[in-house]
Amino acid sequence: MNNSINYRSMKGFKITSLCVFVFLSITAKGQEVKLETYKFGEGLNFSTNDGYPMRITGYLQPYMETKTYTDVDENSTQNRFRMRRIRLRFDGKLKNERFKYRFAFDLSGTSEAGDASTNNFLLDAFVSYDITNRIKATFGQRSTFTDNRELFMLSNTLQLVERSRVTSAFASIREFGLFLEGSFRAGKGSYLKPYFVLTNGDGGNVLEKDHGGLKVGGRIDYLPFGLFTNFGQFRQADIVRELSPKLVIGANFSHNNGMSSRRGRESGAIIYLDTNDLESLPDYTKYGVDFLFKYQGFSVLGEYVKTTASVPSDITQRVRNDGSTSTTFDVNGIQDIQNYVKGRMMLGEAYNFQAGYLFKNGISIDARYTHLKADDNSFLNNATFYNRPNYYTIGISKYLSRNYGAKIQADWTYIDGGLGINNNDGVAIPGNEHLARIMLTFAF
């Protein structure tokens, strides 16, 4: 397992390095590249003599955590140190400024999300076109609009060290397909922002077989008090200290027609077959509502997500990890295909509520409460990764610059293990969990 991870990391680093080298070579060849502006934490802005603007941004986040369990006398502390993210992003335009592009990479190699560790070197790779001043179309791989609002926020702008468990449980994060977005005035300074998504439904970095059908979804956001300052709708803490109240309220919906993973994030992870050895996969529906409020350093984020599934009646086999097949679908000693399939998916509902205040001296005090409620048959009942209904988090951050360029963050989470939990090795643990984390962010 470790050798496989190391191989993927080396391979991913080489691929990423090659992509960056080729990208820079093509951009610079035969052209005079000039650095136009640079502001710490906001990236480098270049231009060429042929009129092609380009921006390079990036950041790194060294991270450590300590996990302890209550009611365990000894050997209960688990420490972890890693480079959480090393992000590098290229944004640019053509002479016709309606055309834009983006490449984004994570050089840390993997992004872990509780129950899965996925190759995540390539983050964004897309081209967008401004159809009108109010409507934009994007084709390629990018973050999707049908996730909860926290996924709209850049990772280096988060109030707390990590995103909530709503995100890790239900978000598909990135997908490949067509994305449409609009921004329209709705009267009295308000705005309406509709989004439409049509993707493969298999998550990001799908380089092999495409499983299942398409995923279709959308979102609609309403901003009653006008637009946020400096893209504040997509950044979590109110570092610009909005001079007037800003609010966005939204709702999202998506339907994945034939899903081959727990939540539509890892293509081909879970496969079922019919009597003719043809793939027969469950459908997955997700919907939710959320909001973000900011005013003079104070910010509040609220989210609700609900998921359901529909299992085909013609499933007769499941594919094991080694590629062999089985006709056994055991649920509590009973052959139950419907509930077995649902038991491997992220089914249930959850909500997340967090608030914080950023003082003028750069210190932020934040708190969060997250609640997960699993369906009777759902992977959310897995005792090793989930089966923890309540998360209580408090945090403190110190912003070392007047933007998101540098900061140090620490938080502590009390995790309710009353339903029965395991440690990382799958061993049953009595009581609850405590999780302490520290992370630094440095951007250029």
Image: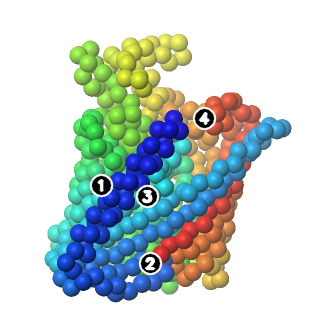
Residue density around tag 3, few if under 14, some if 14–19, many if 20 or more, within 10 Å: many
| Residue neighbourhood size for the residue with mark 2, other residues' Cα within 10 Å, grouped as few (<14), some (14–19), many (≥20) | some
C-alpha distance separating marks 1 and 2: 23 Å
Residue 35's place in the image compared with 71, above or below, is below
Question: What amino acid is found at the position of numbered circle 2 in the picture?
Answer: Glu
Q: Which residue is mark 3?
A: 106
> In front of the other: label 2 or label 4?
2
**Residue 145 image offset from top left, x and y in percent:** 34, 57
Determine the residue positioned at 44% across, 78% down. Answer: 42
Find residue 67 and report its horizontal and vertical position in percent. 70, 47
Please say if 173 is above or below 39. above
The kind of secondary structure element at disc 4 is loop
Which residue in the structure is indicated by mark 4? 384
In front: label 3 or label 1: 3
* Type of amino acid at the residue the image marks with label 1: Gln
Assign a secondary structure to mark 1.
strand
Q: Position of residue 348 (x, y in %)?
A: 48, 39
The mark that comes first in sequence, 4 or 1, is 1
Amino acid identity at mark 4:
Thr
Q: Earlier in the sequence, mark 1 or mark 2?
A: 2
Q: Which mark is residue 42?
A: 2
Residue 195 visible (yes or no): no
Q: CA distance from mark 4 to mark 3?
A: 27 Å
Q: Which residue is labeled 1 in the image?
A: 141
Q: Earlier in the sequence, mark 2 or mark 4?
A: 2
Instruction: Find out whether the residues at labels 3 and 2 contact each other: C-beta distance under 8 Å.
Output: no
Mark nearer the N terminus (4 vs 3): 3
CA gap, disc 3 and disc 1: 14 Å
Callout 2 secondary element: loop
x 61%, y 58%: residue: 63
